[in-house]
Image (spheres, coloured by chain):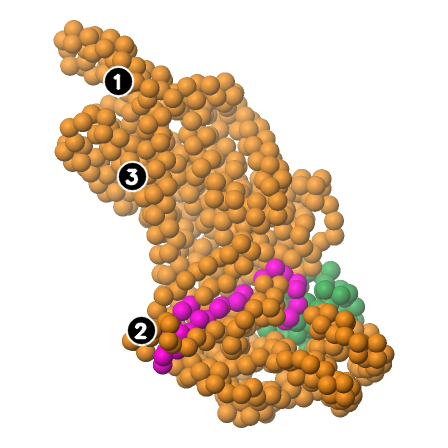
Amino acid sequence: MKKLIECERGEKVRVLKLHAKDELKQRLISFGLMKEAIVEVLEQAPAKQTIEVKVGKMRLALRAQEAELIAVEVL
Amino acid sequence: MEEKSCPVISKHIKVALVGQPNVGKSMLINSVSNAHLHVGNFSGVTVDKTEVLFDYKGYNFTVVDLPGTYAFTDYTIEERVTHDYLCAEEYDVIINVVDSTNLTKNLQLTAELLTMSKKVVIALNMSDEAQKEGIEINAEYMSELMGVPCVKVSAVTKEGIEKLIDTVLQKHQDKKVKPKLVFSEPVEEEIAQIVWYLDKHRFQSENSYRNIAINLLKNNKKTYEKLHDNPIWTELQPILIEASKHIELHHDSDDVKEAFAEEYASFNRGIVAEVLKQKVKQEKKTITEKIDSVLIHPLFGIPIFLFFMWSLFQLTFEVGAIPMDYIDAFFGWMGDTVGATISNEDIRSLVVDGIIAGVGAVVLFVPNIIILFIGIALLESTGYMSRVAFLLDGFFHKFGLHGQSFIPLVTGFGCSIPAYMSARILKNDRDRLLTLFIIGFMSCGARLPVYVLFAGAFFSPEMAGNILFIIYISGAMIGIIAAKVLKMTVFKGVDEPFVMEMPKYRLPSLKLIWHTVLTKTMMYLKKAGTFIAGASMLVWFLSNYPHNLALEAEYAQKIAVESSANEKQKLANQRSSELLEQSYLGSIGKFSEPLFAPLGFDWKMSVALQTGLAAKEVVVSTLGVLYSLGSDVTEGDNTLVGAISKNISFASAVAFIVVIMIYLPCLAASVVFTREAGGIRYFFYLLAFTSIVAYSLAFIAYNVTRILV
């Protein structure tokens, strides 16, 4: 188990748990970032401040602090 | 469908257009309205919904385009608008627009819509694009599985639009058909339990028992409120608590909303697996991902962005300058021609020096405005905007801003009004207020004329584009620094998370860009014709009255005595400028001159700044009126640019630009700001904040330039 922010470019992972609270959790879910979702890390901004991931067919930008709250396992 | 149906006897159908953001809803509404007719845009007090009216087969259709929403949450203001509308307003049918190329994600909202007991029609939009990607959707089978009609449409090729409207018509006449939304076994059991209970007590409701049960389990506030005062509540409550516990246990989560989202997702996966066939194997990397690997490259991303912005301002000046001479010449000719037909000296002066000079000064900049608007429209429609938000979030975050603040900020380069409104994408009120406060630092299109005028007056044409770029960038930088200061002092608090969809890159639709640019340009011209013309007349009046007959007579005598034509001209100019100083406007300018003297402004510039509080275009038209009336412009050099480079020192000009860059936008923008910020006190904060910053920075700029040059 690791955090989404720890994943490298090109890695594919499965979401295990969202540690986010309330509204942020709702937000992530409404974008399809929920348990069992398959996520691929596409791009990283300098110093991993922001990352771009792919969930299903959608690309999503996440700040490091948010990606920190998503527990994943590497596929 | 061409014939107008009588609004009295024909029947009305009100349709709510709902969908996630970026599914082509506005495109769809454009193809519908183009095929039929009139688009009415009512931006209400807090609402941003578009209404389209048209007639079809004897029916009066009203289509309400609601802001895009990912789910039924109240996360952003836009989502709240849509949610409230769907729950509280009267309408007949919902058209749920979904993106065929991203069905699973889009159906997440659909699933929520289906629990509302409203008539729903699903529009499978972008079917042409899906086809290109090798995606095939069996719409008939999908309709059957979901229990709601699904129609393939394409807003671009207009395919299926008519069928969609026919289906809406049909659905409207149908009795309600129960949508088939199936949950997992444990959830279905709990639903059945509650339905049974409601049935036992013959609970009166418009919504079906099943939907009430689902909404109760989902902790839907509105459903709770309805049931709370009912006598059955005391018995229902323990059943609900028990049911929620079961569901949470089943999903290994302490959040029933999360559990339901997972339920929806698995239902949707099931539907998609049944109806969607991907014929062509997708490439490892989509085109969008390939472009992204360049445009949001960790090293090159930001330089590429800066290059794009620089090019835009170069183009704005270089290409925009080409037709300027013609426009200038046209208004000069118009002034002479019209002036020649008017014999009354006062009226001639009002028309020529007031209206034509004022409006002409503003119309002169239409080419620049058009180019700037095209640039912003391109940025918005290609999908690049989100990439910049991605690139800049790290940087912005350090200054207490949010990556998505970039979107209202860049919109602010066009006009502050839509920028203030688009700040709604920021959910956190503190972040939103902070962004609202610094939007004004992004120089809007109306300030462009002032910059172009001054850059043209003091720099060679080759340099002017760069100067323009520098002005815009330094405005933005000052804004960001101001944000940091505000964040550390006034807007302290937790940061809003950054979670944002990166849309697919799209080739911009020419039609859409044309439409956007045309509307905005017409608005600018309309403003020039009405508001600016009125203001010019006012400025003209204030600068011509009261008449000082004694002074006029004195000069008339002097001129009559003088023999050389040169001297006569000189005296005439002297007379005009002395009369101007005697006028109302002169008095205002003289009165406020001491205030602006430390910045190196003469009274004309002071007046122009004050009239600029109404609208920035008025700054140019005021300068136009003031310098065409009372300056010693010589023959052959009677343009405003010439007058400015002659009468204003470089240091004063720099200080003037700094003030224009920073101080309050226009009257209209201030009204919108006050509304969006939520109180008149914020307006006074903004007024004080911008005035102080503008004055101090202009003071520094004036003195530094004076020492250096």
Left or right: residue B546 versus residue B241 is left
Tell which subunit mark 3 falls on.
B
Tell which subunit mark 1 falls on.
B
Q: Is residue B49 above or below residue B667?
A: below
Q: Colour of chain A?
A: green
Q: Is residue B454 above or below residue B269?
A: above
Q: Crowding near pointer 2: few (<14 within 10 Å), some, many (20+)? A: few
Residue bearing the label numbered 1: B573
Q: Crowding near pointer 3: few (<14 within 10 Å), some, many (20+)? A: many
Callout 3 amino acid = Gly
Q: In percent of the image, x 37 and y 50: which residue is there? A: B523
Q: Earlier in the sequence, mark 2 or mark 3?
A: 2
In terms of depth relative to the viewer, which is nearer, B285 or B647?
B647
Is residue B60 rendered magenta in the image? yes
Residue bearing the label numbered 2: B4
Q: In percent of the image, x 60 and y 68: which residue is there? A: B88
Tell which subunit mark 2 falls on.
B
Q: Are the numbered discs 1 and 2 placed on the same chain, yes or no?
A: yes
Q: Position of residue B456 (x, y in %)?
A: 36, 36
Q: Which residues are magenta?
A: B52-79
Is residue B399 rendered magenta in the image? no
Left or right: residue B230 versus residue A63 is right
